[in-house]
Amino acid sequence: MADRRIVIVIPTYNEAENIGLIIPAIHEVVPAADILVVDDSSPDGTGRIVADLATTDPQVRLLSREGKQGLGKAYVAGFKDCLARGYDVIVQMDCDFSHPPHFLGDVLAGLERADVVIGSRYVRGGETEDWPLKRKILSMGGNLYARTILGVPVIDLTGGFKAWKREVLQAIALDEVGAAGYAFQMEMNFRAHRKGFRIVEVPITFPDRTRGESKLGSGIFWESLKMPWRLRFGARKR
């Protein structure tokens, strides 16, 4: 990976408590990687913090968007920006340390044998930490539900800690990606799998956030229920 340009894409909304901590933590693990923060005009000033950091850190950039448009839309905007700038490897991760930066090396190393790498909670060696039982059941059940409908051989289908080779994102019609929330993860896996790209999972520990507020809501839940069926029947038409 030494000869490849790497960028980490982090979508944010009200992550002022975390953003100033996650950036130096990433630099410690992958000092050569650039960082793109895609902020949806956070009222708590997350974007201003990133803009200030970028004045002294040339590896940090801010992509600011108007209003809260959703996780999926933020990633698509970030991916397009990074492809246009010629990056070879694009990593996506959360800002709240639920995707611990020290696993970045393992995720990136997986690209030596695959086109897409998922930091997985549910393969051997992976785990969740400090999750209530209800959340574990919903997450594991949701993954099984989506995997059964879509037929994608990925255990952690909704995992959001991923590394992509640029060729994969170039092959996916990003403008056609419809999921706005966390169903974005399953949709992107489905599209990559249908294009014939190799996806592997590497184990990570996924702790619950300790700072800031979760963005999970009922709308995200219902989108995740409906999206697998939309993808499956939409795929039959193509």
Image (cartoon, rainbow, N blue to C red):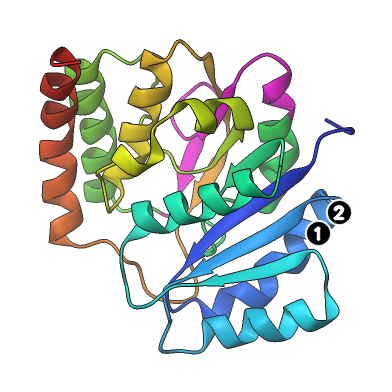
Residue 28: x, y in percent?
Answer: 84, 57
Q: Compared to 64, does 106 lie above or below?
A: above
120 magenta-colored: yes
Total count of labels: 2
114 magenta-colored: yes
- Kindly identify the amino acid type of the residue bearing the numbered disc 2: Pro
Residue name at image x 75 percent, y 62 percent: 25
Near mark 1 (Cα within 10 A), the count class, few <14, some 14-19 or many ≥20, is some
What SS does tag 2 mark? loop
Separation of disc 2 and disc 1 at Cα?
A: 4 Å
In front: 61, or 186? Answer: 61
Residue 71: x, y in percent?
Answer: 36, 57
Figure quadrant of the C terminus: top left
State left or right for residue 8 relative to residue 211: right
In front: 201, or 209? Answer: 201
Residue name at image x 80 percent, y 64 percent: 59
Residue 157: x, y in percent?
Answer: 36, 30
Q: Which residue is mark 1?
A: 27
Near mark 2 (Cα within 10 A), the count class, few <14, some 14-19 or many ≥20, is few
Magenta highlight range = 109-130
Q: Going by the picture, which residue comes out furthest to the front? A: 84
Q: Compared to 17, does 220 lie above or below?
A: above
Residue name at image x 39 percent, y 27 percent: 189
For residue 136, say whether it is visible: no
Q: Which residue is mark 2?
A: 31
